[in-house]
Image: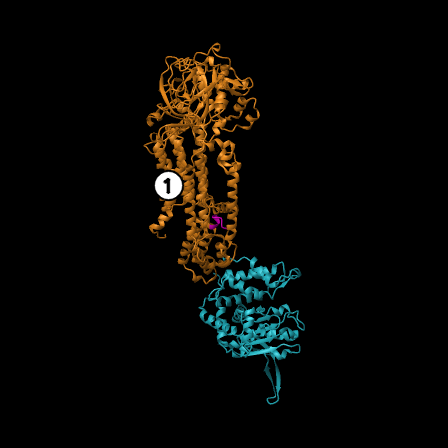
Chain colours: A orange, B cyan
Amino acid sequence: MRLDTSRDAFARGMWPEGLVAALATLAVAWPLTGLLREDSWFVPAVLMVGLVALTGAVLRTLDVPPSLTSVVQLLVSLVGLSQVYLRESLWRGLVPTRDTLLLVGELLREAGTVLQTYAAPAPTTQGVAFLVVSLMTLTAVSVDSMGVTGRAPASAGIPLAAGFLVSVSNSGQAMEPWYFAAVAVLWLVMLAQQGHRVLAGWPSANRREAHGRDDVTANVPTYRGLSQVLGALALVAAVVGAAAIPHLPPTFLGDGLARNPDARNAGEGSAQVSFTETMDPARDLRNQSQAPVLTYRTTATRLEPLRVTATERWDDGRWVAPNRPVSGLLPVDAPIPRPAGLADGVQLQQEQVTVTGNALDVPHLAVPFPVASVQLPDDSAYRFDPDDSTVVLQAPADQYTAAYLSVAGGGELPDGVGEAPADPAKFDEEVLAVDPVSAEAVGALTDEVVAGTSNALQAAILIQNHLRSAPYQYSLTLAPAAEADASDPIGGFLETRQGYCVQFATAMVMMARSEGIPARMAVGFLPGQVQVDGTRRVIAADAHTWPELWISGMGWTRFEPTPGIRSEAPPVYARTPATTGDAAPTTTTVTRTPEPTTTAAAPTPEEESGLSEIWPTLWRTLVGVLVLALLMALVPLVGRRYREEALRAAATPTEKVEGQWLVLTRSLGDLGVDEPPARSPRDMRRHYRENTMMNRSGEDALGRITATLERSRYAAPDHVADADASRMGEDVRTVVEQVREATPWNIRANAALLPQSGLAGVRAWVRGVFRRR
Amino acid sequence: MSAITPAPEAVDLDAVQSVAGAIHGAITTVIEGKDEVVSTAVTVLLAEGHLLMEDVPGVGKTMLAKALARAIDCQVSRVQFTPDLLPSDITGVSVFNQDTRQFEFRKGAIFANVVVGDEINRASPKTQSALLESMEERQVTVDGTTYPLPRPFLVMATQNPIEMEGTYPLPEAQRDRFMARLSMGYPSAASEKAMLLSHGGANPLDRLTPVTTAEDVQRQIEAIRHLHTADALRQYVVDLMAASRAHRQLRLGASPRAGLHLLRAARAHAALSGRDHVLPEDVQTMAVPLLAHRVLPTGEASLARHSTSDLVRDLIGRTAVPSGR
C-alpha cells in the first residue's frame, strides 16, 4: 500500500469538483421555483443533492472504485429519499416494505394528477415534491458519477441538459437568461476544472525532447487542426442552426432583430392587443413585448382571469366578435345585475381588483367574471351588456376598480347543481349551434368522454379534464394536418390534439353544445406576473380564451380546458375529477397510510387488487434484473481472475514477472489499449508509450516494468528476485491507474463492468470445458 | 531454465568495454565519421569473426582494415590480391633446404593475427579458396602437416562490388565464411573535409600506436563466449533463420552457420553495451551486417530493387520475439 498524505486524499476526493457538480444540479432545478407554488421541495432537494455530493467525495477520498461509488451514492440517496418521504411505510423506520412500493405508486399517481390538472405554478403536494426531489437526486447522482467520479464533465452535460430541459420546457414561455447562464457557467467550470487537472498531470516541459520523434505530442498538431475544424463547425452550427430552427420571432441576428415586422411591437414596447377584435390571440401570444397592458392589485388569493368579452358566434371555422346593438345595453353606469341563473345555495365571496394602468382601447374593459360592480374615474362611463355579461366602456379609463364574485372555499357546490338540463327555448340558437362540418366527430368524442352523464357540471368537468389530459399538447404551432384543413379546424384539432387556448376552448364549447349545454367563448387575460411591489402586470402575451358553459344553478360558468403554463388551473369548482354516471363526485386525494401495521394487517380491497395486479410483473422484473446483475457482476470477477491467472500460478520470480506482465497487458487491453505485438520488451514499452497517456511517473514505472521483464526473460535466472516481481506489481498498478485516468469514462465503465479480459476468461473457460469432453 | 545454458561465469564487462573502447578510439583517429561501421568492425573482432568490407574504391576500406590491425599489438600481414596470386603465397610453401637437406615450411601471409586481404575478388577462385579454408578451420595443412594459426585470428578482406571490371565474385559458400559484411559508404561532407585536412600531411596511420595486445583481445573473446543467452533468445535466432528460409523474396536463406555467427556477434554486441546477457535488440542490430551478404534475393525482389539489407530488415519486422513462456 502506498502511503497517502492528506493532500493526496483530498485531491483524489475531488471535493471542489463535487461541489461544483452539486451546484450545477441545483442550478438546473432553479427554473422549477417558478413552476411550483410552494417551495416545500427546495430544502429536501438541497439536502439530497448535498448528500449525494458528500457521499461521492468521501468515497472517492477513500479510493473506492468508481462504479461502486456510483452504486453507493444511488443507495444512499434511496435511503435519504425514503427517510424524507416514505418514512411511515418503512419497517422500523429503515427497511422498505410492500407499503413503500404502494406509497411510491400513490405519490407518483398523485403527482401525475396534479401536474395534469394544474397549470404552472402547480401546488407542491407531497407527491409533486417527491417526484421533483427524486428526479433531482437522480440528476445529482448521474452528474456526480459522470462529471466527477467518472472525470468526464463533458458527458455530465447530458443529465444537466436533460434536467434543465424538463424544468424549462414546462414553463412554456421564454425564461430569463440567467437561468441558463447559471447552469452553463457551472458546467463550464466543471469542464475547466477537468482540463486544468489533465494539463497539470502532464510533464509539459521538455517532453518532446525527452522522447524524440516517437513522442505522442508529435501528433498534437493533427488534433489541434481537428479541434479547430470542430470549433469552427460548432460556431457555424450555432449561428445557422439558431436562425434555421423555429423560434419565437425577434431573438436572432438572422431575423433582423427588432427590424422584423413580427417583432416590431416588441421593439416599440407596444401593449397593443388585437385579439379583442379577432377573437384569436395567436398573434398576441407571440408578442414578446414586456410592456404592461394592465397593471392591477387584487385582494383575492385565488386569481381569476380578466375577462374582456365573449362571443357565441362561430362562423365558417372562426369566432366572430359579438354584434352589440346599443339597444341591448343597460343604461350608462346602471348597477350591474346579479348573474342570472345563480342558485342561492352557492357560497360566493366578493373580491376586488384595482387597476392602476390600463392600455386597452375603448370599448374594452378587462374585469374578472362575473363582475358585480365597476367604479370608473369621473370622466369615464360604462354600459353593461347582460347578454354576454360584458362591460362596454364609453370613454378611456386609465384606472378603475371592479368587484366580482367567486365561488368560496374549496368550491363545494350544493346538490342539484347542473342536474336540470338547459331549456333550449330560453337561449339563442347560436349558443347551442355545433359547427356542422365537425358535428359528427365532436358528437362521437363527447359521447365517449361523457359516457351518459346527465349532470351538466359533471359532463363539463369530464370534457375539461379530457382536454387537459396527456395526449393533448399545448403548442402555438398547429400540427400540419390542422393547417391544411382550414374549413374544419375543430375536427383537425381533435385529430392532431395540438393547439393553444383557442383550439381547446373551441373544442370544449362545441363538445358542450353537442351535449346540449349552452356554451360560449370568452376572451381576456391570464392574471399575469406579480411584480416586486405586489402589483400584477398583464402583458400582451397573457392573452387567453376560455369557454363559458351554462350550468343550471351556476349560470354562465368558466371552465379551463387548456393545459400548460399559458393557462390557468381549472376553476375551483371544476377541479374534482368527475365520475361517470350519476354517482356523486368522490374526491380522491392521496390516502396516506396512517399506521403501517394496520395497513399491512388489513389492506383495503382497492389496494390489494392494485397490488395483486402489479406484483407478478414486478416480481418477474425484479428477478430478471437480479439474475442479469449477477451475471454482469460475474464478468468483472472472471476478468480479474483471467488477468491474474499467470500471477496466481507463479512460483519462481521469473514466472511472477511474467504474471505481472500479463496483468499489465490484459488490464490495459480492458482499457482499450491494444496488446503489444510479440516484440522485445523495449519495443513493447515503445508501443505502450505511443498508445497511452501517462505522466512522467507513469512512464518511469513502465520503464522499470519492461526493464524487469527484460532481465527476467534474457538475463541469467539469478538476476531476478521476488522483490523485483513485487516492485513490478506496484509499477503495474501505477501504470494501469494512470492510463485509466486518461481514458474516457465510457471505456472505463466498460472496463469496470464488462471487461474484455472477463469475456476472454469466459471464452477460455468454455473452450476448456469442451476440450475436456 | 534450460540445462544447456553454460554455467554463469562472471564476465569482466569493464575489461571488455575498455579494450573495445580503446580499439574504437584508435580507429576513429584515422577513420572519421564512420562510428557505426567501426563499432560493427570491433564487435566482429571480439566475436572472433572475419570481416568483409565491400564498397567502391577509395572510401577507406583498406584504411579501416589497417587501422584495426595497427591498433592491436600483434602480427599483421597484408596481402594484395591479384589475378596471378598463388594459393601458396597465402598458406606458405615447403622449401628444400640445401644445408639441412630437408624440406622446410615457409609460412605464408596467413600466419598472422590480423590478415588484411585487399581486393580479395581480384584473385582467382583457387587462391580465394585457399584463404577461405584456413579462415574457417583456423589452421593450414601443407604436405600433410597441419600448422595452427595464431589466435586471435581475424581476416579482413576488402572487395569492390562485383559489377566492377576484372573481378571474380566470391561464391555464396565462401561469403558465408565471413561473419559480417560492411559497407563503408561515402563520408559526410564535414568528415570528408576533416579528412582532407588530417590526411594532407603525414599519414595518420603512421601515428597510430597499438592500444592493446593480441593476448588481451583473445582473453576478451574467450570471456564473451560465456555471456548468458536465454532460451527464448536462442529460439529467436532459430526463428529468424527459419523465417529467412521461408521468406518469399529470398531465394537462399541463412545457413545454420549464419545462426551461430549471429549469436556470437549478438553476444559481443551485448558485452560491448555493458550487459551480461543478450537481448533481442543485440540480435536485431547485428542481423543486417551478418545476414545481408549470405541471403540471395529472388529475381522479383532484385527487379523491385529490394536490397538484401532491406529484406533482412523486413525479416526482423515479421518475426515475433518469443517470450519464453
Query: Does the magenta segment cover residue A62?
Result: no
The stretch of residues the image draws in magenta is A668-673
How crowded is the residue under tag 1: few (<14 C-alpha within 10 Å), some, or many (20+)? many
Query: Which of A398/A746 is in front?
Result: A398
Position of residue B251 relative to residue A513, above or below, is: below
Kindly identify which residue carries mark 1.
A53
**Tag 1, which chain?**
A
Query: Does the magenta segment cover residue A669?
Result: yes
User: What amino acid type is highlighted by mark number 1?
Assistant: Ala
Q: Is residue A773 visible?
A: no
Q: Is residue B198 visible?
A: yes
Q: Where is residue A32 in the image (x, y as percent from the top left)?
A: 40, 33
Position of residue A320 relative to residue A713, above or below, is: above
Query: Of all residues shown, which one is farthest toward the front?
Result: A379
Query: Which of B70/A163 is in front?
Result: A163
Q: Where is residue A689 in the image (x, y as percent from the top left)?
A: 48, 55
Q: How many labels does the image show?
A: 1
Query: Which of A500/A201 is in front?
Result: A500
Q: Where is residue A39 in the image (x, y as percent from the top left)?
A: 36, 31
Query: Of all residues shown, which one is farthest toward the right?
Result: B166
Q: Position of residue A402 (x, y in %)?
A: 38, 20
Query: Which of A349/A638 is in front?
Result: A349
Query: Of all residues shown, which one is farthest toward the top?
Result: A425
Position of residue B292 relative to residue A727, above or below, is: below
Q: Give the structural element (helix, strand or loop) at label 1.
A: helix
Residue beneath the point at 36% across and 44% down: A57
Position of residue B211 relative to residue A405, above or below, is: below
Query: Of all residues shown, which one is farthest toward the bottom?
Result: B99
